[in-house]
Image: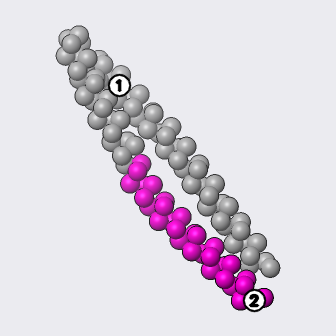
Amino acid sequence: MEEKENQNLNNLKEKAENLRHKAFMQMIYIAFIFAVPAAIAFFVGNYFDNIHESGRQFKLIALPIAFVLSWIITIFQYRRIDKEFKEVEQKMIEEKEK
């Protein structure tokens, strides 16, 4: 019986370690979440500024919009991962109490 509990606990620890790796990969993903929209906003804003000869007006509008969109995506990703962490932690607590 005790061996099965240890096995379950080990499985949960392994799952927690996998989630840590997933969180690290998520940080890299977040870097892309900010870089790609910012680059697109920069070039699109620059393109429209050149067409309409408006100075930097379009670029100054597009960059904050890209920044806000990036944060919205980041918050949703964080909530998803946090939910998974909480589920694993709760299962680990339940296993230890058995």
SS at circle 1: helix
Structural distance between the alpha carbons of marks 1 and 2: 59 Å
* Residue type indicated by callout 2: Glu
Q: Give the vertical position of 57 relative to 83 (above or below).
A: above
Residue range (magenta): 1-30
* Residue type indicated by callout 1: Ala
Q: Residues within 10 Å of mark 2 (few under 14, many from 20)?
A: few
> Which label is found at residue 62?
1
- Tell me where residue 94 appears, x and y as whole percent: 76, 72
Q: Main secondary structure of the magenta part?
A: helix
4 magenta-colored:
yes
- In the picture, the quarter occupied by the C terminus is bottom right
Nearer to us in this view, 48 or 9: 9
Nearer to us in this view, 13 or 54: 13
Give the residue number, with chain letter if any, for mark 2: 2
Q: Give the vertical position of 30 relative to 16 (above or below).
A: above
Q: Find residue 64 and report its image quarter.
A: top left
Is 91 situated left or right of 70 in this image?
Answer: right
Residue at horizontal 65 percent and vertical 65 percent from the top: 88
Q: Is residue 55 visible?
A: no
Q: Find residue 49 and report its image quarter.
A: top left
Q: Give the vertical position of 45 relative to 32 (above or below).
A: above
Residue mark closest to the camera, 1 vs 2? 2
Nearer to us in this view, 84 or 66: 84
